[in-house]
Image (cartoon, grey):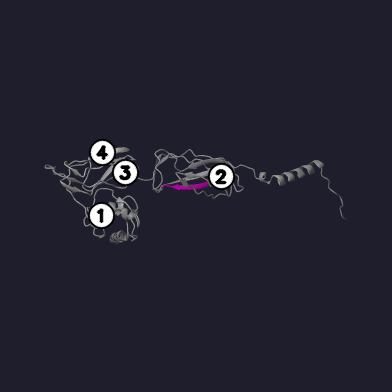
């Protein structure tokens, strides 16, 4: 038998339902007006130390409530961070790797102004981290000449002044060895150990900072020592370098930066001189890593049974710095 009994609802419930429907129709943007919040941002750099090129920080962001499919906006040391989650939005992680082009940071740099935008487009307030205790030494010191050696000097111990933006240990290449081995931030004046009469055009210096990063070698201007009648037996001879000769440095960490086709600078010049001294390179000495230099590097790598990549990476640098 069919039940024809009707159900009646109180008018108050009916009116409430009508009101809610009207609000949703009139103000649909308020349906998802919930504002997400970030509970915390932590890092793996929470123990004092120094981060160098290639080192990494992993950041972990924890929302107050799980936020699947959210997007995170945040930068660190000038680099945009890419965040991802593996647990449905309970936490998000991002990695920062130190690049040689990044800025050095002498005090711990905190991550700041990070926001979370949920899948409905609602964005949290910005939040900063506070636990980073490591500094960043992304690259070696930058060196510039302040006062050159006069082109002709009448002393066996001329002086030279350079400016460094980092403190560290001074390393020397070529004829000129300084009596000073420590660099400070700012102006550094060094007096060379006794030199013999003649032209000295193969002098370089560099600075290895406290983190172990080496600068690009600074070329000291060519100069001539003359009218020196009494030098000590330890005086450095003039070993003028031409396109046909090159002195192999020893006992100095010479090659620090990766070098490949298209690289430029003093490091390339030193590499070419070294390869020429070892009989692998027969081209001109320049500051450009071109096809001839690449071929020479391959010959060097083949001689020492390395993969013949034609570029100077960690393995090749290690052999060069061992004097091989």
Does residue 23 appear left or right of residue 312 in this picture? right
Between 27 and 301, the residue placed more toward the observer is: 27
Estimate the spatial distance between the alpha carbons at disc 2 and disc 3, rounded to whole Å. Answer: 42 Å
Q: What label sits on residue 116 in the rendered view? A: 2
Check the image and report above or below for 106 versus 298.
Answer: above
Q: Secondary structure at mark 3?
A: strand
Q: Which residue is mark 4?
A: 189
- Answer few, some or many: residues within 10 Å of disc 3's Cα (few below 14, many 20 plus, some between 14 and 19): many
Residue stretch rendered in magenta on the structure: 91-98
Estimate the spatial distance between the alpha carbons at disc 3 and disc 1, rounded to whole Å. Answer: 22 Å
Specify the farthest residue to the right. Answer: 1
Callouts 2 and 4 close, C-beta under 8 Å: no
Mark 3 or mark 4, earlier in chain: 3
Q: Secondary structure at mark 4?
A: strand
- Answer few, some or many: residues within 10 Å of disc 2's Cα (few below 14, many 20 plus, some between 14 and 19): many
- Answer few, some or many: residues within 10 Å of disc 1's Cα (few below 14, many 20 plus, some between 14 and 19): many
Q: Which residue is mark 3?
A: 143
Q: In the figure, residue 145 lies in which quadrant?
A: top left
Estimate the spatial distance between the alpha carbons at disc 4 and disc 1, rounded to whole Å. Answer: 27 Å
Q: Quadrant of the C terminus?
A: bottom left
Between 284 and 250, the residue placed more toward the observer is: 284
- The answer to whether any part of residue 324 appears in the image is no
Is most of the magenta stretch helix, strand or loop? strand
Estimate the spatial distance between the alpha carbons at disc 1 and disc 2, rounded to whole Å. Answer: 54 Å
Q: Which residue is mark 1?
A: 273
Q: Residue 21: say if magenta.
A: no
- The answer to whether any part of residue 186 appears in the image is yes
Mark 2 or mark 4, earlier in chain: 2
């Amino acid at each position: 038998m069919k039940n024809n009994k009707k159900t009646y609802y109180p008018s108050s419930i009916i009116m409430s339902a009508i009101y809610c429907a009207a609000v949703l129709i009139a103000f649909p943007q308020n349906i998802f007006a919930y504002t997400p919040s970030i509970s915390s941002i932590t890092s793996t750099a929470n123990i004092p130390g120094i981060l160098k090129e290639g080192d990494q920080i992993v950041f972990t962001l924890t929302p107050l409530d799980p936020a699947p499919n959210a997007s995170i906006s945040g930068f660190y040391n000038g680099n945009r961070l890419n965040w991802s989650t593996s647990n449905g939005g309970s936490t998000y992680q991002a990695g920062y790797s130190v690049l040689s082009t990044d800025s050095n940071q002498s005090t711990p740099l905190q991550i700041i102004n990070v926001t979370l935008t949920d899948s409905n487009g609602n964005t949290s307030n910005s939040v900063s981290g506070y636990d980073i205790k490591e500094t960043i030494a992304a690259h070696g010191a930058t060196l510039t000449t302040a006062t050159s050696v006069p082109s002709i000097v009448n002393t066996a111990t001329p002086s030279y002044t350079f400016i460094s933006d980092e403190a560290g240990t001074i390393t020397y290449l070529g004829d000129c060895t300084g009596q000073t081995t420590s660099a400070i931030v700012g102006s550094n004046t060094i007096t060379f150990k006794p030199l013999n009469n003649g032209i000295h055009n193969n002098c370089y210096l560099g600075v290895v900072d406290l983190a172990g990063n080496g600068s690009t070698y600074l070329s000291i201007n060519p100069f001539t020592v003359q009218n020196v009648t009494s030098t000590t037996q330890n005086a450095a001879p003039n070993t003028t370098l031409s396109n046909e000769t090159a002195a192999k440095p020893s006992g100095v960490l010479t090659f620090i930066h990766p070098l490949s086709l298209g690289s430029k600078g003093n490091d390339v010049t030193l590499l070419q001189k070294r390869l020429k001294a070892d009989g692998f390179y027969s081209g001109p000495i320049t500051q450009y890593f071109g096809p001839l230099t690449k071929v020479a590097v391959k010959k060097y790598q083949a001689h020492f049974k390395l993969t013949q990549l034609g570029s100077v990476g960690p393995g090749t640098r290690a052999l060069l710095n061992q004097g091989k």
